[in-house]
Image (spheres, rainbow, N blue to C red):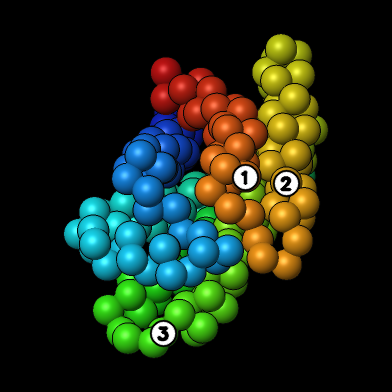
Amino acid sequence: MNRERNRPLGALLAAATVLMVASAVIVVPAGLTLNPSDTAATLAAVRARPGLHLLELGLDVLGWLALAAAGLTLAARELRERPGVLVPAGLLALAGAAGLLHDAGNLAVTQMAAVPDAEAAAQAVLLTAKWSVNLAGLLWTASTAVAVMALPLPEALRRFGVAAAVSGLAAVVLPWTAGAAGPGPVLEQAGYALHLPVMAWWVVLAWRWLR
């Protein structure tokens, strides 16, 4: 792939990762992790710091939008020359869409935090948002696994991609160990850590295309 043509794609991938990491850096220390197993505490945390919550939510929305745009850009550029790239590109775009669905749930929770007696409805929204982001992680991991095979890559980067996909799959499986209530803050943070290699692999691709 021509590097000049792919600089915008690299910029989108880098922006997606930076924005999502920035959002997580705000969420975790501030205790704004949206936890369906303790809905009352979640609503109280959002109610106490709505501005900060909206800031991290805005960053996350921009991150998932950038990821979806990167997938669509990759598909549009390589469809004629390299049809095999369409699958990982499509999966990447779908991951971005699932992430946006997750953020839509987060925004709804922000509004519910200001409404009395909204705990039962908020729990359902929180569960939907949690499983939406898990779906996004699954799609992003699948995109990584397919891209390893479809893209022309150095052997070292290909091996890194395989390891990243395994780590991402572990992140996707982790919430299922929590049962119907969904993952609590500790499991969620472990999932973030396990998904970092997937994000890092795409950042390396972005760097290669930006140079």
Mark 3 and mark 2 residues within 8 Å of each other at the beta carbon: no
Question: What residue is at 73 percent from the left and 67 percent from the top?
Answer: 180
Q: Is residue 151 above or below residue 119?
A: above
Q: Is residue 105 above or below residue 8?
A: below
Of badges 2 and 1, the one in the foreground is 1
Residue indicated by mark 1: 187
Mark 2 and mark 1 residues within 8 Å of each other at the beta carbon: yes
Q: Residue 90 at what x, y percent from top left?
A: 65, 55
Residue indicated by mark 2: 174
In terms of secondary structure, where does tag 3 sit?
loop
Q: Tag 1 or tag 2, which sits nearer the N-term?
A: 2
Question: What residue is at 44 percent from the left and 53 percent from the top?
Answer: 33
Question: What residue is at 53 percent from the left and 75 percent from the top?
Answer: 123
Q: Residue 56 at what x, y percent from top left?
A: 31, 52
In terms of secondary structure, where does tag 2 sit?
helix
Residue 78 appears left or right of 110: right
Hey, what amino acid is under mark 3?
Ala
Question: What residue is at 31 percent from the left and 84 percent from the top?
Answer: 115
Q: Residue 175 at what x, y percent from top left?
A: 70, 52
Is the C terminus in the top left, top right, bottom left or bottom right quadrant? top left
Residue 105 appears left or right of 176: left
Q: Nearer the viewer, residue 133 or 206?
A: 133
Q: Nearer the viewer, residue 145 or 86?
A: 145
Cα separation between marks 2 and 1: 7 Å
Hey, what amino acid is under mark 1?
Leu
Residue indicated by mark 3: 118
Is the N terminus in the top left, top right, bottom left or bottom right quadrant? top right
Quarter of the view holding residue 58: bottom left
Residue 32 appears left or right of 126: left
